[in-house]
């Protein structure tokens, strides 16, 4: 407190001699000590009075200073601040509007930046995160086409690489049994040890190592903090206990620390895959993603060169499997964040634009207020206030306002952030990292300061530029009403608003178009859920077929069910498996890599249950499996791709590699309509459908139940049927097909709504800006209007004149904005569907909306202009 | 024209009027006692006033009579012109009081 007092004395009473200051401080200390005897209360009251009286004294003591020292500048700044505060208090309406605008604008920016910061900027929570890479296959001909790798390739690359330590992962699910209801957990299987590569020490026990991945090593698992707390109540004796996962006992050897996630937050288990020798050699099964850490001293460039060299060798050694493939190492953070970064930066830019518009409006508001103060300032100038001093005074005022807005905006931003995180659709990676940290704090304060400078500079410069004598002599009413600065601000905010409107318009059109996409099947009144057959019971194919077909048959008997079926994956969700496609009569030339095609393992009634229409041939029946006449049905797109001119029906095909076939031979018996496999608006429609009796090794099925009523009402009965068939099987993803559809478009919907919100706010603010400037101009010109009316101008003409004046500005703004929009919306290309970034129709519509709004905003002041009573105006002279 | 004398400054002069040399804390204490704590100066007010009165020559600084320990403390002593100023102010106040009596705001002196 004493130190604070010393500082305050220096600032507020700089004229006090050093010695006097020391004495004053000593005296204050003694008085404070006296007061302290009366309790903390009295002590506080004493200091309050002390500081208050100091401030009052300083106000009385202020005298013109000769040489400005740091102290004297400080003290004049303090004076400016005091003056500014009083001024803000004197116009509470203006202050309130300004603070509200700022708090909302800065708050929205803070919230979005918190997300950008958490998702994109904050480093990953692994040691040396920048040395971690995701490595995937890419097509040599098109490096944007990424895909998984095979165990054979992985082990070769791992053995050969000297610049990177490598592991491979596959995310999957496993059913936990023996601890209450069976439940499905998400896990990561690792070849090599991905935990060693990441390098995060466990909070309990140990991580698994490459040695644990050897064939025949004891089966172990490392669990998440979350699972540890839930299942083991965070007890240390969890280590060494057994978890029954997928019917296999796994020993818990370690618990990862709280907050550890890899590759995403859903994962609770990490375990070595322990593939058998045959699988380890496979070159045709693509399911692994490589994770690598640069070796000490190795550079990314050296690592990429080495990976390329290794891949070159693998292409030559295994031309059929690898002929078209290259390797691509992507920084882990980039890979984890994926395409969200585009969306986030666009949102950040949009919300920044909103703040920019808000600033323009505030600048106009302050300009108007400052013009009212023109005389005061002219007087101060006339009696000797320097221009620098005046500009500083005005800047201090706006900075004060901006900082107050920043503090409130910080709080508003925290609220916005909480609401936004809860509202945003699931699946934004690292969203849990979004919080207000030091960087966000710095961002907010920086934004506030920049804001203050931006909206404060215009009025400050304009006012101080005018010669005082002019202002004093000038009668405000006779000024021309021209204000180039104001016009500039309005043009600017209209341009920015148009960019936002166009962006929002593009997203809205995309959304509408996406929703119009035909999914290829009937989506309403379908219940779906997944079940995975695990454990020794299902080692043999007949058991698997019996379970799936049995459940389907019993589902069909439920009242309210019109059809039921099962398939390896539901459409839309974007997951699935693919295999090389081979027409037996037309073998691919040796040494080339055959094209891959997604395939689906289904039960016979799948097309009926999903209502996927048949185009040619026939649908599948129970006799089309291995035990009958092996047959498949293909989608129209597959038919077009492999038989552009011929009829595929009757052709024999197989899937897979010559030495690793999914089935030896099956006849194409029918063609069905394309179904959207990778979400609405996704590009994936190729599919080969075969029965679960043709590909009996499949274990993981999505059941689809078509109902006559509300599908989710049957969830309980469906669950019971599975439980009756096998109580050890866990059910996941019980939901209506329409929910899957909704989830698939949720990100598009969310970004559309956010951008539409920002654009809406921008539009309203731009309208307010135009309105404000036009009203002001009309006020200034009321005398001119009066004269015009008195001389016989018709009100309609005056009105037209005012509107035309305003619309000139609006047009300039729209032209500039259109140019900006055409250029800036190119960044949105990846978020659009069915509409191109520069879409002229959208741009035209957005311009029209903006112009109409601007016209309305001009019309109101224009109408007032015609109501000017010429007599009153002229008499006022 | 005599510069205006604030009530605080007048009280400071009063504290010093009987010729005592007082340091800042003692002045505040003295004023508080005399006025039944009605006027309680803060350190800031006091030293701002002291500085002004030093500059105008109404008071001077003197070294404190040897106190034990601590840095040598400054005491303040009233000057001739300070005493004159205080007397003028007192007379002005007396006249003011007399006027108040004439107007029956206060009882006549016994």
Image (cartoon, rainbow, N blue to C red):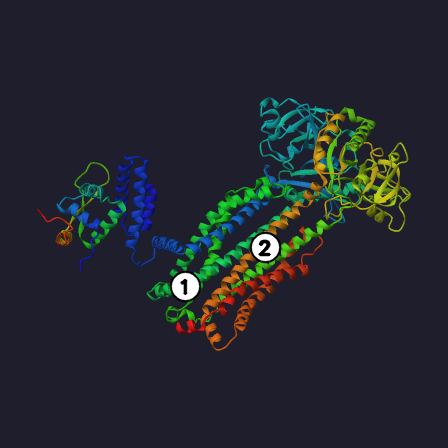
Tell me the quarter of the image containing the C terminus of chain A: bottom left
Q: What is the chain letter for disc 2? A: A
Secondary structure under tag 2 reads helix
Query: Is A676 displayed left or right of A224 in the figure?
Result: right
Q: Is residue A167 above or below residue A762?
A: above
Tell me the quarter of the image containing the N terminus of chain A: top left
Q: Position of residue A409 (x, y in %)?
A: 49, 48
The residue closer to the viewer here, A480 or B67, is: A480
Query: Is A525 displayed left or right of A541 in the figure?
Result: left
Q: Is residue A454 visible?
A: yes
Q: Position of residue B13 (x, y in %)?
A: 17, 48
Q: How many labels sit on residues?
A: 2
Distance of mark 2 from mark 1, alpha carbons? 32 Å
Secondary structure under tag 1 reads helix
Q: Based on the displayed image, in which of its 4 quarters is residue A69 positioned?
A: bottom left
Crowd tier of the residue under label 1, counting other residues whose Cα lies within 10 Å: few below 14, some 14–19, many 20 or above: few
The residue closer to the viewer here, A410 or A753, is: A753
Q: Residue at x 12, y 45 (%)?
A: B18
Q: Residue at x 76, y 26 (%)?
A: A725
Q: Position of residue A812 (x, y in %)?
A: 58, 66
Q: Is residue A161 visible?
A: no
Q: What is the chain letter for disc 1? A: A
For label 1, the residue is A372
Q: Based on the displayed image, in which of its 4 quarters is residue A695 positioned?
A: top right
Of callouts 2 and 1, the N-terminal one: 1
| Marks 2 and 1 close (CB-CB < 8 Å) | no
The residue closer to the viewer here, A800 or A295, is: A800
For label 2, the residue is A759
Q: Position of residue A760 (x, y in %)?
A: 58, 54
């Amino acid at each position: 407190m004493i130190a604070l007092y010393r500082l305050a004395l220096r600032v507020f009473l700089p004229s006090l001699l050093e010695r006097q200051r020391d004495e004053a401080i000593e005296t204050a200390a003694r008085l404070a000590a006296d007061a302290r005897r009366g309790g903390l209360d009295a002590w506080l009251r004493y200091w309050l009075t002390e500081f208050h009286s100091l401030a009052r004294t300083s106000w009385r003591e202020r005298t013109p200073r000769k040489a400005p020292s740091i102290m004297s500048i400080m003290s004049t700044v303090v004076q400016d601040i005091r003056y500014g505060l009083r001024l803000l208090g004197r116009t509470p309406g203006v202050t309130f509007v300004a603070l509200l605008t700022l708090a909302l604008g800065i708050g929205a920016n803070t919230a979005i930046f918190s997300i950008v910061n958490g998702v994109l900027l904050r480093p990953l929570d692994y040691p040396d995160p920048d040395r971690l890479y995701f490595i995937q296959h890419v097509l040599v001909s098109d490096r944007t086409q990424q895909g998984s790798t095979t165990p054979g390739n992985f082990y070769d690359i791992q053995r050969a690489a000297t610049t990177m330590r490598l592991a491979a992962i596959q995310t999957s699910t496993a059913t936990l049994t023996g601890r209450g209801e069976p439940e499905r957990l998400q896990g990561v299987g690792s070849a090599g040890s991905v935990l060693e590569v990441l390098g995060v020490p466990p909070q309990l026990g140990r991580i698994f190592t490459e040695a644990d991945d050897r064939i025949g090593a004891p089966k172990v698992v490392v669990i998440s903090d979350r699972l540890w707390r839930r299942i083991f109540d965070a007890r240390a004796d969890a280590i060494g206990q057994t978890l029954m996962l997928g019917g296999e006992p796994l020993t818990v050897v370690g618990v990862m620390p709280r907050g550890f996630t890899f590759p995403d937050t859903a994962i609770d288990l990490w375990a070595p895959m322990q593939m058998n020798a045959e699988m380890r050699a496979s070159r045709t099964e693509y399911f692994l993603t490589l994770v690598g850490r640069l070796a000490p001293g190795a550079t990314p460039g050296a690592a990429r060169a080495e990976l390329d060299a290794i891949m070159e060798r693998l292409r030559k050694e295994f031309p059929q499997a690898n002929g078209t493939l290259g390797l691509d190492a992507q920084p882990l953070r980039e890979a984890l964040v994926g395409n969200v970064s585009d969306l986030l930066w666009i949102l950040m830019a949009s919300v920044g634009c909103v703040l920019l518009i808000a600033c323009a409006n505030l600048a106009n508001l302050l300009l108007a207020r400052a013009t009212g103060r023109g005389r005061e300032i002219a007087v101060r100038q006339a009696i000797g206030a320097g221009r620098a001093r005046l500009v500083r005074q005005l800047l201090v005022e706006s900075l004060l306002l901006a900082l107050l807005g920043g503090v409130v905006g910080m709080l508003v931003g925290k609220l916005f952030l909480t609401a936004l995180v809860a509202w945003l659709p699931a699946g934004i990676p690292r969203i849990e990292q979004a919080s207000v940290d030091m960087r966000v704090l710095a961002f907010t304060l920086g934004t506030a300061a920049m804001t203050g400078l931006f909206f404060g500079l215009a009025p400050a410069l304009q006012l101080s530029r005018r010669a005082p004598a002019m202002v004093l002599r000038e009668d405000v009413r006779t000024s021309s009403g021209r204000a180039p600065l104001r016009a500039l601000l309005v043009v600017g905010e209209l341009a920015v608003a148009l960019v936002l409107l166009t962006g929002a318009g593009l997203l809205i059109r995309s959304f509408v178009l996406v929703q119009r996409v035909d999914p290829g099947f009937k989506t309403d009144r379908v219940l779906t859920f997944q079940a995975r057959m695990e454990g020794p019971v299902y080692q043999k194919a007949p058991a698997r077929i019996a379970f799936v077909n049995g459940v389907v048959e019993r589902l069909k008997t439920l009242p309210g069910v019109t059809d039921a079926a099962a398939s390896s994956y539901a459409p839309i969700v974007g997951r699935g498996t693919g295999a090389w496609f081979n027409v037996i009569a037309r073998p691919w030339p040796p040494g080339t890599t055959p094209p891959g095609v997604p395939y689906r393992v289904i039960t016979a009634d799948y097309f009926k249950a999903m209502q996927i229409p048949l185009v040619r041939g026939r649908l599948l029946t129970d006799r089309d499996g291995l035990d009958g006449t092996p047959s498949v049905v293909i989608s129209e797109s597959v038919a077009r791709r492999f038989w552009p001119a011929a009829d595929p029906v009757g052709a024999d095909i197989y899937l897979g590699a010559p030495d690793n076939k999914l089935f030896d031979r099956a006849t194409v018996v029918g063609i069905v309509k394309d179904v959207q496999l990778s979400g609405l608006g996704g590009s994936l429609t190729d599919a080969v459908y075969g029965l679960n009796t043709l590909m009996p090794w499949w274990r993981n099925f999505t059941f689809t139940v078509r109902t006559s009523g509300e599908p989710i009402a049957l969830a309980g009965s469906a669950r019971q049927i599975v439980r009756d068939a096998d109580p050890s099987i866990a059910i996941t993803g019980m939901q209506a097909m329409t929910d899957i559809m909704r989830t698939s478009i949720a990100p598009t919907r969310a970004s559309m709504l956010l951008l539409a919100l920002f654009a809406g706010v921008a539009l309203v603010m731009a309208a307010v800006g135009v309105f404000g400037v036009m009203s002001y101009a009309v006020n200034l010109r009321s005398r001119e209007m009066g004269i015009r009316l008195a001389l016989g101008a018709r009100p309609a003409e005056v009105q037209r004149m005012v509107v035309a004046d305003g619309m000139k500005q609006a047009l300039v703004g729209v032209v500039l904005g259109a140019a900006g929009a055409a250029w800036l919306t190119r960044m949105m290309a990846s978020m659009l569907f069915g509409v191109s970034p520069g879409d002229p129709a959208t741009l035209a519509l957005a311009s029209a909306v903006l112009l109409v709004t601007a016209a309305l905003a001009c019309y109101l002041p224009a109408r007032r202009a015609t109501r000017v009573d010429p007599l009153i105006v002229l008499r006022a002279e | 024209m005599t510069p205006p004398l604030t009530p605080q400054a007048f009280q400071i002069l009063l504290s010093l009027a009987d010729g005592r040399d007082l340091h800042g804390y003692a002045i505040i204490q003295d004023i508080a006692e005399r006025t039944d704590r009605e006027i309680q100066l803060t350190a800031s007010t006091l030293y701002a006033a002291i500085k002004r009165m030093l500059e105008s020559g109404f008071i001077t600084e003197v070294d404190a009579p040897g106190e034990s320990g601590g840095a040598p403390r400054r005491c303040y002593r009233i000057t001739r012109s300070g005493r004159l100023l205080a007397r003028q102010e007192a007379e002005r106040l007396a006249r003011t009081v007399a006027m108040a009596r004439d107007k029956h705001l206060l009882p006549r002196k016994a």
